Image (tube, rainbow, N blue to C red):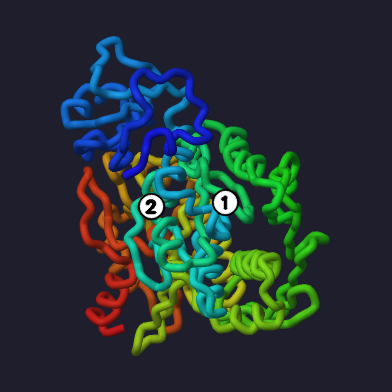
Amino acid sequence: MLLLNDILKDVPVMNIIGSTVVTVDALQIDSRAVQTGDAFIAVRGTVTDGHKYIKSCIDKGARVIICETIPDDIDQTVTYVQVENSAKALGQLASNFYGRPSSMLKVIGVTGTNGKTSTVTLLYRLFRALGHNAGLLSTVENQINGEVIPSTHTTPDAIHLNQLMKQMVDSNCEYCFMEASSHAIDQFRIEGITFAGGIFTNITHDHLDYHKTFDNYLKAKKRFFDELPSEAFALTNIDDRNGIVMLQNTKAHKYTYALKSPADFKAKIIDNNVRGLEMEINGSEMFTRLIGEFNAYNILAVYACATLLGVDKLECLTQLSALAPPDGRFDQIVSAKENITGIVDYAHTPDALKNVLHTINAIRKGNETLISVIGCGGDRDATKRPVMAQVAAHLSDKCILTSDNPRSEDPNEILRQMNEGVAITDRKKVLTITDRKEAIKTACMMAGKDDIILLAGKGHEKYQEIKGIKYDFDDKTVLRETFLELGK
């Protein structure tokens, strides 16, 4: 419970009707959750406009309405606060309501197309291993000092975000490592958060269903760095051709990392094999169980961030060597009898898929057959579907196109679009099986001794979403069970 006056601190207000000396029990953006004494923030979202539900929220007992357009029908018992942009104001409102928790943490935001989850998860595990209290906000899960809190979005809405950070403060956390997705940046979900640092991993083809153009997508990522405070650091992958763009207008201290270009933090791969990576970082050698060049970038970003936060370099490298890969990122399952290696990976963009397949091809001995199983999600960027199939077919010995999360779309239509991208020379390699479980079983039946199966796209997910229903489905579980069933 807090006075509205205090909640409005630093929020640009256009007009107020009613008293600001009124207590607010909770902030709500979901009209269904409103209870007596709450403040309802009417946000114009991508699906619906919160302004439509102002009257129903007042009927439920909302004490305060924060909106862009004040209704014609004024209720004298309610305070109305008019702001220019409700979504943008929400971040500061939520921060104020929960006592500005981000200012009491060192919050590190990671943005980019690929590598966000791996980077924040590795940072969280590293700082926990170093003895620090820390919080994690990621696609896979949220954690506070080892306690798992389920994750529903890459970045939660501003209310839940500040609520989680308040819990971190109450748990004596020093650090919070969080993904900052382009959707969250564009929708002002991280507004009002005080960042101690920002990391840019890379940017490739993704989310054009939402952003419409690559330029819009790039600008969303860049805005995160443009708004970093002068006390923060901005760390960017200079090997990415847009890496330098992120630093152009930032007030933060600028740092770069790279494998191929001159940079503040420079690494090179000494050896990349099935056991892991041997790397040299700024002149010091280390080994990590993570595999592939894309993970070399993740490890380098983590090392750079940790040292910028004051961690001893040798201790950092020692602890990094002991870290396991995040769930659903190049997860390996080996069959008992025929030594078939199953790899489960979240790769769901053309670039991520290419990285994983290049990594597998780099570490294989040469006589194994590589079978990839890949789908594309429904209600998402359709332009990448033929590209994903093209990459999978070209870089695999055999390829099975199947369903991912079709959501509201017809899975067969998604597969038709994917098949359009398969080159004529690769068509003999490709099978199309709509049912994902059947596709995995077929891949296992096709695989012989020492072969490799890649299940791409779903990674850590424990469900498959079809027509609005989430069915239990875990690629790793299905793979293990199929190996046993077939006696592989």
Q: Where does residue 168 sit, x and y in percent of width and height?
A: 43, 62
> Could you tell me how many numbered marks the image carries?
2
Please tell me the numbered disc located at residue 111. 1
453 or 155: which is nearer to us? 155
Q: Where does residue 460 sit, x and y in percent of width and height?
A: 38, 64
> Mark 1 is on which residue type?
Thr
Quarter of the rendering containing residue 126? bottom right
Q: Residue at x 41, y 74 (%)?
A: 342
Quarter of the rendering containing residue 159? top left
383 or 391: which is nearer to us? 383
The residue most toward the bottom is 337
Q: Residue at x 51, y 53 (%)?
A: 102
Quarter of the rendering containing residue 169? bottom left
- What is the crowding at mark 2: few (fewer than 14 residues within 10 Å), some, or many (at least 20)? some
Q: Earlier in the sequence, mark 2 or mark 1?
A: 1
The residue most toward the left is 59
Quadrant location of the C terminus? bottom left
258 or 87: which is nearer to us? 87
Which residue is under mark 2?
163
- What is the crowding at mark 1: few (fewer than 14 residues within 10 Å), some, or many (at least 20)? many
Q: CA distance from mark 2 to mark 1?
A: 21 Å
**Horizontal relation, residue 151 to residue 393: left or right:** left
Quadrant location of the N terminus? top left
Q: Residue at x 62, y 55 (%)?
A: 196
369 or 237: which is nearer to us? 237
**Horizontal relation, residue 463 to residue 311: left or right:** left
The residue most toward the front is 21
Residue 293 visible, this orientation: no
Tag 1's secondary structure? strand
Tag 2's secondary structure? helix
